[in-house]
Image (cartoon, rainbow, N blue to C red):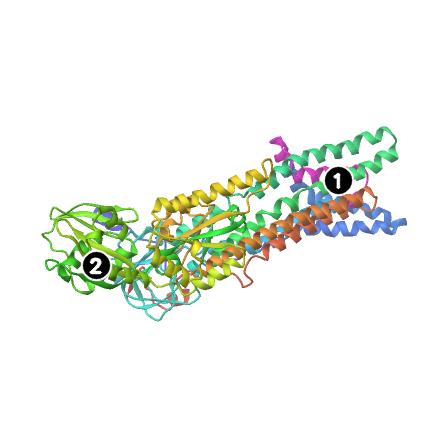
């Protein structure tokens, strides 16, 4: 803009352009994460002082006039309650503010000024105490939101060493960004130059820094903790990065309400008007009998209104879910709402996909045999490379990597047409007008080619399968099967321990795989699965049918036992896979958990996402879900128990208004603190903004351009 104006003869000088000492700044925004610390309002504190003074009336005699200090306390604490109650009543609704206002005015009408002050002050105080108690959960969620990078150092021109600092959201795909030590990586990308360690704990929960070198993928929001600068070529916009999607999902998860939460709200919505109507009846009809009886019953009616206030009951569930969601996110687990915690707590079977879940999904070509003189090793690798180079399955990557390692490439003159995938079998295409197949034994049995395989080669294939390898073949039209190969995948080191630990939760592990039976049995036995729980040679739709069958059987059995019950099924099934080729099964299961290579892709559709490939996180998820479920039961039971005790004491004549409101506030604080125990005990991590003001002041960054 400046250059255009100068070219047109406009004389100008720039006083401020949005940059401060080389940094793009948004006024009013701070990079430092500030934890929420609710402050007690002065009028509430003063209201409490006057309430305490009013209690001196109990001394009697000349001290009796001190009860009028209760009116001052009420005048300080009530206006905010009254405004909220007025807003609610205008919508033809009735909430806790209305109940407390009614109780306060009723106590004043009975000249019980100290008790009116107790209701107004303690209820106002309870809101502040609730904010204090839940601030830890809010701070945990805020720390997740702060993972989003604010700024980026973008290369101005390709091949130059000039970088300009701009908002991370303005970085385009394909840009080269500089990430010095201690800075956040602004967007997902690939390391272009440099070698350093990156702290991914904010995204995956993994505390150990990961070594990154040219060609390695990095995620936006992670931090360069090594001693060298990284140059990163971006592959996505800041708003489309894995960390941005994580933030969105965590925010959305707070809105998704569970069945228990909705049930409690519905009960509170229905029973509150009934209790209020009963309390109004207690405060009115007894006066027809006598003033003394009317006064006594009015007091009990006001106490009933206070006791009926469902504060503790309503807050008992959402505060627990928020703490659970925050705790899971800090461990690198995204749970899309409290409903999934409830479902996981009732799971009694977990179906694991094999490739990429129980195994690492990192296949290697172990053996390649060719027996047709026309198709030597190089020619076979050319065919395999041509057929698999555009596929994303781990098996395909193993074959293409083997071809590359032997410097084999696809001839430019080859014409590849009609390439398509055969679900659970392999791929087919036309190369130089000849139909070519690459796939497993089932494919070639269907094609009627397997019986033509030389006995010697069939024996080799069977031997490979007995060793737990995945076996495949290559056929070319006119020549039949011309080669066989075997690839192997390593079992995750933690898989056996996880499978064993899962059983301690009374959950039965099952493995679903499209691999051959012998290879499946070998892997299954390595991780400790029983033979009956190893389901092999399954096509993607057969995995889906298995999940459908389990869900349908569970629902039918449940309806036979509880045909007219509000009970919920306790034999749910969880599907855990990489989301690459088992997405339908993940969607059909009661709970779908995506992890591994496809986790980023499946993040938006899965119920739960493990942001790295550590199966131990699945154990943490199950344990956390059990704790969340039990905490909710504890909170609801405690809330109802307190109300029952206080109501009993009320009708026995052993309580009063301030004791009733005190018990309600106390119960609310107890259930809130009980929910907060789900959060990790360590302090919230304060994420640096990525730019050190001291370095800037020291001259490392001059104006908007830094020479690297």
Quarter of the image where one finds residue 97:
top right
Locate residue 54, reporting x and y percent.
79, 49
The range drawn in magenta is 86-115
- Whether residue 216 can be seen here: yes
Q: Is residue 30 above or below residue 272?
A: below
Count the numbered circles shown.
Answer: 2
Label 1 secondary element: helix
At a point 67% along the width and 37% down the height, the residue shown is: 98
As drawn, the label of residue 304 is 1
Farthest residue, direction bottom: 227
> What's the magenta bit mostly, secondary-structure-wise?
helix
Q: Quadrant of the C terminus?
A: bottom left
Label 2 secondary element: helix
At a point 65% along the width and 45% down the height, the residue shown is: 313
Q: CA distance from mark 1 to mark 2?
A: 87 Å
Farthest residue, direction top: 288
* Viewer-closest of 409 and 54: 409
Q: Which residue is mark 2?
A: 455
Comparing labels 1 and 2, the label whose residue is closer to the camera: 2
């Amino acid at each position: 803009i400046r250059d255009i104006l100068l070219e047109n003869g406009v004389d100008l000088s720039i006083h401020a352009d949005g940059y401060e000492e080389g940094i793009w700044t948004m006024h009013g925004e701070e990079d430092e994460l500030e934890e929420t610390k609710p402050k007690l309002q002065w009028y509430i504190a003063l209201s409490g002082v006057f309430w305490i003074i009013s209690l001196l009336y109990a001394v009697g005699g000349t001290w009796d006039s001190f009860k009028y200090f209760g009116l001052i306390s009420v005048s300080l604490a009530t206006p905010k309650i009254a405004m909220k109650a007025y807003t609610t009543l205008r919508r033809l609704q009735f909430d806790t503010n209305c109940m407390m206002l009614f109780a306060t005015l009723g106590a004043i009408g009975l000249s019980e000024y100290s008790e009116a002050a107790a209701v107004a002050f303690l209820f106002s105080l309870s809101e502040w105490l609730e904010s204090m108690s839940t601030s830890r959960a809010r701070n945990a969620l805020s720390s997740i939101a702060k993972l989003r990078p604010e700024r980026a150092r973008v290369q101005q021109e390709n091949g130059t060493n000039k970088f300009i600092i701009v908002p991370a959201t303005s970085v385009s795909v394909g840009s080269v960004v500089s990430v010095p030590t201690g800075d956040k990586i602004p967007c997902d990308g690939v390391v272009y130059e440099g070698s350093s360690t990156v702290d991914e704990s904010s995204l995956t929960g993994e505390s150990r820094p990961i070594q990154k070198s040219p060609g390695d993928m990095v995620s936006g929001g992670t931090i360069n903790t090594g001693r060298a600068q990284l140059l990163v070529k971006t592959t996505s916009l800041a708003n489309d990065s894995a960390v941005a999607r994580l933030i969105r999902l965590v925010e959305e998860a707070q809105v998704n309400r569970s069945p228990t939460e909705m049930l409690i709200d519905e009960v509170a919505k229905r029973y509150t008007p009934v209790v209020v109507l009963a309390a109004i009846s207690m405060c009115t009809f007894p006066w027809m009998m006598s003033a003394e009886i009317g006064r006594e019953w009015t007091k009990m009616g006001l106490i009933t209104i206070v006791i009926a206030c469902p504060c503790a009951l309503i807050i008992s569930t959402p505060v627990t879910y928020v703490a659970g969601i925050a705790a899971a996110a800090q461990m690198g687990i995204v749970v899309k709402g409290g409903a999934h915690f409830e479902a996981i707590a009732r799971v009694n079977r977990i179906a694991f996909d094999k490739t990429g879940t129980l195994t690492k999904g990192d296949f290697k070509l172990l053996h390649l045999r060719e027996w047709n003189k026309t198709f030597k090793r190089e020619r076979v690798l050319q065919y395999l490379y041509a057929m698999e180079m555009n596929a994303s399955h781990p098996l395909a990557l193993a074959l293409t990597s083997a071809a590359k390692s032997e410097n084999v490439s696809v001839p430019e003159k080859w014409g590849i047409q009609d390439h398509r995938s055969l679900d659970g079998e392999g791929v087919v295409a036309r190369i130089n007008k000849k139909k070519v197949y690459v796939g497993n034994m089932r494919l070639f049995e269907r094609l009627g080619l397997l019986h033509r395989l030389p006995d010697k080669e069939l024996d080799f294939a069977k031997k490979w399968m007995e060793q737990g390898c995945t076996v495949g073949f290559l056929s070319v039209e006119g020549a039949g099967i011309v080669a066989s190969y075997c690839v192997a995948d390593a079992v995750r080191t933690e898989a056996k321990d996880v499978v064993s630990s899962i059983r301690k939760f009374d959950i039965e592990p099952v493995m679903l795989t499209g691999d051959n039976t012998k290879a499946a049995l070998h892997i299954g036995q390595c991780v400790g699965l029983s033979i009956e729980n190893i389901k092999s040679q399954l096509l993607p739709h057969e995995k889906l049918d298995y999940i459908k069958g389990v869900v349908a059987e569970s629902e039918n059995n449940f309806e036979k036992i509880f045909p007219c019950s509000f009970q919920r099924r306790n034999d749910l099934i969880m599907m855990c896979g990489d989301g690459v080729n088992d997405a339908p099964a993940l969607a059909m299961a009661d709970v779908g958990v995506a992890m591994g290579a496809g986790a980023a892709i499946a993040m938006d559709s899965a119920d739960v996402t493990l942001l790295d490939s550590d199966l131990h996180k699945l154990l943490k998820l199950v344990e956390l879900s059990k704790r969340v479920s039990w905490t909710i039961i504890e909170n609801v039971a405690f809330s109802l128990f307190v109300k029952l005790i206080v109501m009993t004491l009320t009708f026995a004549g052993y309580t009063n208004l301030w004791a009733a409101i005190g018990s309600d506030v106390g119960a609310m604080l107890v259930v809130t603190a009980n929910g907060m125990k789900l959060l990790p005990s360590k302090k919230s991590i304060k994420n640096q903004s990525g730019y050190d003001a001291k370095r800037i002041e020291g001259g490392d960054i001059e104006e908007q351009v830094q020479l690297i």
